[in-house]
Image (spheres, rainbow, N blue to C red):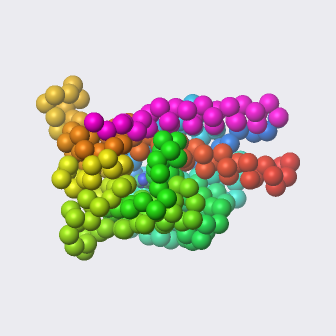
Amino acid sequence: MAIIIDGKLIAAQVKEEIAAEVLKMKEQGLRAPALAVVMVGNEGASATYVASKVKSCQQVGFESIDLHFPEDISEETLLQTIQDLNNNPGVDGFIVQLPLPSHINEDKVIAAVNPDKDVDGFHPSNVGKMALNIPAFVSATPAGIMELIARYKIETDGKEIVVLGRSNIVGTPISILLSRKAYPGNGTVTLCHSRTKNLKEVCSRADILIVAIGKPEFVTADMVKPGATVIDVGIHRIPSTETKSGFRIIGDVQFESVSQVAGYITPVPGGVGLMTIVSLLQNTLKAAKEKRKEGPTA
Ligand code: GUN
């Protein structure tokens, strides 16, 4: 039976560390870090994530600014809002929750964010720096995965690492991070996608398997090498007659069977998801500290 990588426990520890730093800043007479979250429309999953982000800010003593716009906001107005946040000295970092409605160009929105306030790490400048191993904001989910690997002291050096899914937010950045000359890193990384052949065979070579494919319970025990570390990034809400709410949350990995063969595994919920928010808080703290170095008005 695999060791469970407890995202809830690690997230709580990191939050305590952040809260202690915020307290220190306040004792020195500095303003608490401030994070703004921009949301467009009312998509259910996004609304839940945004509410969690705002609540987490409060838990660690950050200021949070919640900006909610209707679904039909124009691209121009959204871009103007981003400029205002870029220019607002009271905001250390901000994010625009994705996905955006189809009439808004996401790439344009991401590129409009000042890279120094881009605590999501989505701006091309931050992605490029990350790839070159230059200090930058690393996007929250990959950063959270790196934190879990480091805190559980999972060996990555020279290991076969297989990533399922090549999204800009998760698969692509984690594949780069784990192949960099660093710890966690120095892995031999294979990035799999819809055109990959012999997927099962590739997966079963992995010492570390990172699954961000967006398909419920896609990975089964026969795809996993005994003793491997399995990181599940998926989150799916499915109907259930066994819960009061009428649904339950599952991941991209069939937990019951895979946990019988894996060495380490992240549960869903209680794994990577909680770490994503914590990484956003870490990035915001970093942005605030950098800004305070700039001078007394910052
Ligand atoms: N949508 C899904 N994940 C994320 C994330 O990490 N940041 C933003 N802004 N939107 C998302």
Asked whether 246 or 21 is in front, the reply is 21
Instruction: Answer with the quarter of the image where residue 88 lies.
Output: bottom right
The answer to whether residue 153 is visible is yes
At 70% from the left and 48% from the top, the residue drawn is: 288
- Magenta span contains residue 76: no
At 68% from the left and 52% from the top, the residue drawn is: 287
Residue 54 placed where, x, y %?
Answer: 52, 39
Q: Considering the image in quadrants, where does the N terminus appear? A: top left
At 27% from the left and 65% from the top, the residue drawn is: 202
> Looking at the image, is 95 positioned above or below residue 8?
below
> Looking at the image, is 187 positioned above or below residue 4?
below
> Looking at the image, is 204 positioned above or below residue 216?
below
> Looking at the image, is 57 positioned above or below residue 106?
above
Asked whether 24 or 262 is in front, the reply is 262
- Magenta span main SS: helix
Ligand 1 position by quadrant: bottom left
Residue 73 placed where, x, y %?
Answer: 45, 59
Left or right: where does residue 184 sit relative to residue 3? right
Left or right: where does residue 13 sit relative to residue 253? right
Residue 193 placed where, x, y %?
Answer: 29, 69
Residue numbers of the magenta segment: 1-28
Number of marks in picture: 0
The answer to whether residue 172 is visible is no
Asked whether 155 or 223 is in front, the reply is 155
- Magenta span contains residue 5: yes
